[in-house]
Image (cartoon, rainbow, N blue to C red):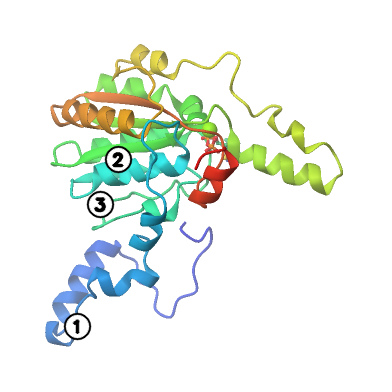
């Protein structure tokens, strides 16, 4: 499903990758196996590119962009046994700092909005008795379409943290509507219609509490998010469930500094 189709292969092997690779390694001469390159040498080809990061770290005390949120979460997870069950659409590649197969569970394959909560809780169930902290970072739209899965986590006492990247929009489709409007010579400023989830803002925290999660007031700055992650991690480490509503400016973060300029930040 990584490719949405069967990939072209020379030798098809019906096996779980972990099992197969472990058995294959046993059969290989370890001395012939090239040593993994140290990170410093991989800079130009890897996602965890320090040069990019030094260009734009989160601006303290200011409303977050998705980039700021991603960098704050990356910093929080550094060196901790965190499993990201999900990361939202628009998450910047530079925020993926993974050091093992359990660092990230990937996506759902089909790309359906609403699978984030259930996917996160399923991963958390699988990791329940491990020492890992399972975190699902999901869009507010994804959260809203599958929020009832949180009840399942409470019912079965599954430790898990859910963080919503709350831009008050099905933002991905604002982008689509803008593109289509341009192609069809229609007003692109109407792109928000049917996608913006505001006026009134939905109380995501109340929805989490209604299903038995602990939570707190929405956070909107990098340092407030960092503090909330710390509180949440303690609760989850003690077997609890925590929800964080992380307010971000509408806009995707793949170009951090550019997006900053777009929302009027230095
Ligand atoms: C069931 C379903 N409906 C609609 C879509 C189209 N779609 C893809 S991403 C997206 C927006 C998701 O919103 P959110 O989770 O808040 O993420 P954002 O784009 O705002 O970061 C939509 C509507 C889809 N993939 N699946
Ligand atoms: Mg959204």
Mark identifier at residue 118: none
Distance in Å between CA atoms under marks 3 and 1? 23 Å
Mark 2 residue crowding within 10 angstroms, few (<14) / some (14–19) / many (20+): many
Q: Is residue 264 above or below residue 205?
A: below
The residue beneath circle 1 is 33
Q: What SS does tag 3 mark? A: loop
Position of 206 with respect to 127 (left or right) is right
Please tell me in which quarter of the rendered image ligand 1 is found.
top right
Residue drawn at the location 64% of the way across and 29% of the way down: 195
The quadrant holding residue 77 is: top left
Rendering coords of residue 266 (x, y %): 49, 43
- Viewer-nearest residue: 136 or 244: 244
Residue drawn at the location 37% of the way across and 47% of the way down: 57
Mark identifier at residue 102: 3
Mark identifier at residue 123: 2
Q: What SS does tag 1 mark? A: loop
Rendering coords of residue 42 (x, y %): 31, 72
Q: Earlier in the sequence, mark 3 or mark 2?
A: 3
């Amino acid at each position: 499903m990584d490719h949405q189709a069967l990939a072209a292969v020379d030798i098809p092997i019906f096996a779980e990758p972990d099992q197969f690779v472990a058995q294959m390694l046993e059969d290989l001469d370890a001395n012939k196996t090239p040593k993994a390159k140290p990170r410093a040498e991989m800079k130009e080809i890897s996602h965890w590119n320090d040069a990019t990061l030094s260009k734009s770290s989160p601006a303290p005390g200011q409303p977050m962009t998705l980039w700021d949120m991603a960098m704050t979460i990356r910093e929080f997870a550094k060196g901790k046994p965190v499993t990201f069950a999900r990361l939202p659409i628009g998450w910047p590649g530079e925020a993926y700092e993974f050091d093992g197969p359990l660092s990230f569970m990937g996506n759902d394959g089909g790309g359906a909005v609403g699978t984030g909560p259930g996917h996160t809780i399923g991963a958390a169930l699988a990791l329940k008795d491990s020492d890992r902290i399972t975190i699902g970072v999901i869009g507010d739209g994804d959260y809203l379409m599958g929020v009832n899965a949180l009840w399942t986590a409470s019912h079965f006492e599954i430790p898990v943290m859910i963080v919503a990247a709350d831009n008050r929009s099905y933002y991905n489709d604002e982008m689509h509507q803008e593109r289509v409007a341009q192609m069809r010579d229609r007003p692109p400023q109407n792109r928000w219609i049917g996608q913006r989830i505001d006026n009134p803002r939905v109380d995501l925290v109340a929805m989490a509490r209604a299903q038995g999660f602990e939570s707190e007031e929405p956070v909107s700055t990098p340092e407030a998010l960092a503090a909330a992650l710390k509180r949440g991690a303690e609760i989850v480490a003690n077997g609890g469930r925590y929800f964080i509503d992380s307010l971000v400016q509408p806009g995707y973060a793949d170009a951090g500094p550019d997006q900053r300029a777009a929302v009027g930040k230095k």
